[in-house]
Image (cartoon, rainbow, N blue to C red):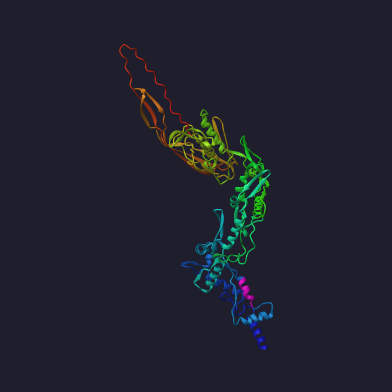
């Protein structure tokens, strides 16, 4: 005891004010050093290892990584503090024992490393592309009216934290090669669990369920009930989820799989549920307008360049959440007919008054009107229908407006009629003829608003009734007209039409732009080619113009958008149009004149009736 006491006293004297003998940070010896010296020494040693490249291998793949690549940092003060405490525990006997043992066995403290998360993700991302494979749970599918279970598979995952620790250790010890630590990523659901869920769903959908509302009844047959079932993990459910009850787990289920399945992650189970969103999609439309009343969207009214919001109205509709819960209960009930009562809830419109007001649409940004002859009733109908089809459209900031995507095809089923149009460069007649007048008006309103026009196609033939180069053709499915709302606020498109005009206006918040449309010019111009056609119905020596023809060529104009505040340019854009020529057709008479018989009074040949050009009501 005296000898032991003398050893303790001697040890205390030798190591006074120093980290005890035999204490290391990983393999870096800190024993016998003061705390200040130990921090300096440790920092130097760790710094030397920062640029040391370590080869990480996985199969035939390899990667070179340094601790610096991971952005690693070390808390040297904490490491030295931990080293200092060894042999200085509060319990005197424990401290003495630790000091004594340190002469025979190294006392090691952990080198705690903190990598930069972004750098670590970037570096390890190259490795995980090879090492990681997501586990696939066993699943259930519906085929031929039968719920069938299919097995999944375990995956693999790189152990990133472990690898970082390994790289740190290698950088200290000089180890050059490491094998990537990859662990099995267990599936959460085994094949046997999936079979249990499939059986429960199959049993629950064997018998029809009647849905009742007032005096109306709808029979939901087994085929319809099966469509309502989906399968979710038990850790992905909320309190309103309409679950079908599973039997209590048998021994091994939830831990071991059957039919070739491997061990799962534990307590997660596959639950058959009646999806409220599926009920909303499949059952609510089946009930139709019989249940409740439809909500009314908020709308906008524009007058005198000012916009006001017309409040929306809530409606009543079947409650899909409660209906799903009732169905789940009844589908697993025993005995007697199965039926549920459809309950209603208040249903807000898609565009509520609050949402409409929050858009901040308050003033007119731009407007444009084009004019036409209202004598062609079919063309007038088409223009009126097209203008109404996108009246009230709202384009949010950053979103793209597509005319075709908004209004769809202009076909007879929607009331469009056959009228004059230009197809493949030829005047003709087709259903929807005249709708390009509306598109041209929209194009010019968009130009004046300062939005970013991304798609526009000119007519094949030049149309003199529009400003030079500022027409826009549209047809289904192409060409289309598109623009991106590059302004900071939502845009409301308002249209109106009369028997001789159509107007398109953009409303929102004035962006403070000046928009200048430079005068268009012909970059090249070709006169209409002349074609002379013999006409045996016209007397020799007479000619008449059947088709006036049109010149063609290349036209351009530039749109310049500047800020009113300082005159700085927001953007400039040049629009180029290419027009074909249209032949000027002249009919040349070839009918011979006849000489009168002697003694007869010649019968005068009547003058030919004037021949007018064919009607060409362009789009």
Whole-percent x, y for residue 586 in the image: 38, 27
- Which residue is at a point 31% across and 14% down the rendered structure image? 597
Q: Is residue 385 magenta?
A: no
Q: Residue furthest top?
A: 599
Q: Is residue 502 above or below residue 63?
A: above
Q: Is residue 562 above or below residue 466?
A: below
Find residue 461 and report its image quarter.
Answer: top left
Span highlighted in magenta in the image: 78-86
Q: Is residue 294 visible?
A: no
Find residue 384 and report its image quarter.
Answer: top right
Q: Nearer the viewer, residue 253 or 118?
A: 253
Whole-percent x, y for residue 609 in the image: 41, 21
Whole-percent x, y for residue 311 in the image: 66, 40
Q: Is residue 128 left or right of residue 358?
A: left
Q: Is residue 544 above or below residue 229?
A: above
Total numbered labels: 0
Q: Is residue 81 magenta?
A: yes
Whole-percent x, y for residue 171 in the image: 52, 71
Q: Is residue 563 above or below residue 498?
A: below
Q: Residue furthest bottom?
A: 2
Q: Residue furthest front?
A: 336
Q: Nearer the viewer, residue 237 or 586?
A: 237
Q: Nearer the viewer, residue 172 or 135?
A: 135
Q: Nearer the viewer, residue 29 or 134?
A: 134
Helix, strand or loop: magenta stretch: helix
Q: Is residue 105 visible?
A: yes
Q: Quadrant of the N terminus?
A: bottom right
Find residue 139 and report its image quarter.
Answer: bottom right
């Amino acid at each position: 005891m005296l000898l032991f006491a003398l050893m303790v006293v001697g040890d205390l004297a030798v190591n006074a004010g120093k980290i005890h003998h035999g204490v290391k940070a990983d393999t870096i010896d800190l024993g016998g050093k003061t705390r200040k010296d130990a921090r300096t020494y440790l920092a130097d040693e760790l710094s030397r290892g920062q640029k040391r490249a370590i080869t990480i291998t996985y199969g035939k793949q390899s990667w070179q990584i340094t601790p610096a690549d991971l952005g690693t940092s070390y808390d040297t003060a904490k490491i030295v503090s931990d080293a200092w405490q060894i042999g200085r525990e509060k319990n005197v006997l424990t401290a003495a024992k630790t000091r004594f043992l340190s002469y025979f066995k190294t006392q090691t403290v952990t080198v705690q490393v903190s990598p930069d998360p972004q750098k670590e993700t970037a570096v390890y991302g190259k490795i995980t592309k090879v090492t990681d494979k997501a586990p696939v749970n066993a699943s259930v599918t519906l085929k031929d009216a039968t719920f069938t279970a299919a097995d999944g598979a375990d995956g693999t995952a790189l152990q990133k934290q472990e690898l970082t620790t390994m790289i740190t250790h290698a950088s200290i010890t000089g180890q050059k090669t490491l094998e990537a630590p990859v662990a099995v990523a267990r599936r959460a659901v085994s094949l046997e669990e999936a079979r249990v869920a499939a059986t429960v769903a199959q049993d629950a959908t064997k018998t029809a369920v009647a849905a009742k509302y007032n005096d109306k009844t709808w029979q939901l047959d087994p085929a319809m009930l099966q469509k309502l079932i989906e399968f979710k993990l038990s850790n992905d459910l909320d309190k309103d989820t309409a679950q079908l009850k599973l039997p209590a787990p048998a021994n091994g289920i939830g831990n071991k799989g059957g039919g070739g399945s491997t061990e799962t992650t534990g307590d997660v189970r596959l639950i058959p549920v009646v999806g409220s969103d599926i009920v909303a999609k499949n059952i609510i439309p089946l009930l139709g307008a019989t249940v409740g009343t439809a909500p009314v969207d908020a709308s906008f009214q524009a007058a005198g360049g000012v916009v006001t919001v017309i409040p929306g109205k809530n409606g009543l509709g079947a409650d899909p959440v409660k209906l799903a819960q009732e169905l789940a209960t009844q589908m697993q009930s025993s005995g007697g007919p199965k039926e549920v009562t459809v309950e209603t809830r208040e249903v807000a419109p898609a565009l509520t008054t609050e949402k409409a007001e929050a858009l901040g649409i308050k003033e007119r940004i731009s407007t444009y009107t084009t004019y036409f002859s209202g004598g062609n009733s079919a063309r007038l109908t088409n223009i009126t229908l097209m203008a109404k089809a996108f009246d009230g459209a709202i384009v949010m900031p950053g979103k793209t407006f597509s005319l075709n995507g908004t209004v769809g095809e202009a076909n007879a089923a929607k009331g469009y009629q056959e009228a004059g149009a230009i197809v493949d460069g030829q005047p003709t007649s087709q259903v929807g003829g005249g709708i390009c007048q509306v598109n041209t008006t929209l194009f010019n309103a968009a130009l004046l608003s300062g939005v970013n026009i991304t798609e526009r196609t000119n007519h094949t033939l030049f149309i003199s009734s529009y400003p030079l180069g500022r027409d826009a053709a549209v047809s289904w499915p192409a060409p289309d007209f598109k623009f991106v709302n590059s302004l900071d606020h939502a845009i409301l498109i308002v249209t109106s039409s009369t028997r001789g005009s159509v107007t398109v206006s953009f409303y929102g918040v004035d962006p403070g732009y000046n928009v200048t449309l430079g005068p268009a010019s012909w970059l090249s111009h070709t006169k209409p080619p002349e074609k002379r056609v013999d006409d045996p119905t016209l007397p020799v020596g007479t000619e008449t113009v059947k088709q006036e023809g049109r010149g063609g060529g290349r036209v351009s104009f530039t749109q310049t958008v500047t800020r009113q505040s300082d005159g700085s340019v927001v953007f400039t854009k040049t629009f180029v149009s290419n027009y074909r020529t249209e032949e000027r057709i002249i009919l040349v008479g070839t009918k011979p004149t006849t000489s009168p018989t002697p003694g007869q009074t010649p019968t005068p040949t009547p003058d030919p009736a004037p021949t007018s050009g064919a009607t060409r009501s362009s789009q």
